[in-house]
Image (tube, grey):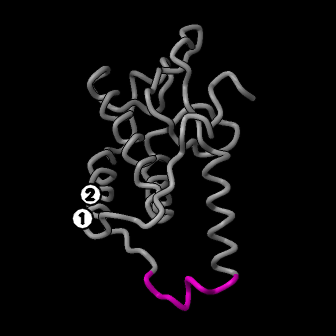
Amino acid sequence: MSLHFCTNLSLRQDTEYRKFAQEVHILWKKLGRRIRSDSSLSSLIFLERPFIVPGGRFREVYYWDTYWIILGLLRSEMTSTVKGMLENFSNLVDKIGFIPNGNRVYYVRRSQPPLFIPMVNEYYEVNLYYPKFPSEKLISHNSVRSDNQK
């Protein structure tokens, strides 16, 4: 499954398409999270880098959902955010031995379908064919909610 970017100039100039794309970019910022390193009293498993959650009520990542999120982030040219999320998953594999269902202590005994390799492949293909985006967007530590914010 390969991700292909919109290269159709007429579609990129379409007003409705551009409005939709702008709304999606606003959503990414609202769905961005990070975990404070001092959140040891929480059931959250620490992730070093910022990440995107599947919906506004969540404070944790979910393995299956992240695949689809990554596809959207890559379409939005947010490759640095994707790289950080992949590094978070890689760190979970180092720490736990696999990627759990979500980054909560009560999920460490179960996982979801193995999508890590397809995630890495999508990231690789985007960087191979589109190595430098003109204005790469990044979810920074300052632009996302931490686990203790509501």
Label 2 belongs to which residue?
Answer: 124
Label 1 belongs to which residue?
Answer: 128
Residue at screen point 69% across, 81% down? 16
Q: Three-letter amino acid code at disc 2?
A: Tyr
Residue stretch rendered in magenta on the structure: 7-15
Extreme residue toward the bottom, this view: 10
Q: Quadrant of residue 4?
A: bottom left
User: In what quadrant of the picture does the N terminus appear?
Assistant: bottom left
Query: Are the residues tagged 2 and 1 within 8 Å (C-beta)?
Result: yes
Would residue 28 appear left or right of 136 to someone viewing this image? Answer: right
Q: Is residue 117 magenta?
A: no
User: In what quadrant of the picture does the C terminus appear?
Assistant: top right
Residue at screen point 42% across, 74% down? 5
Residue 21 in picture, x, y percent from top left: 62, 69
Q: Quadrant of residue 42?
A: top right
Check disc 2 and report its element: helix, strand or loop. Answer: helix
- Give 143 or 5, whichever is nearer the viewer: 143
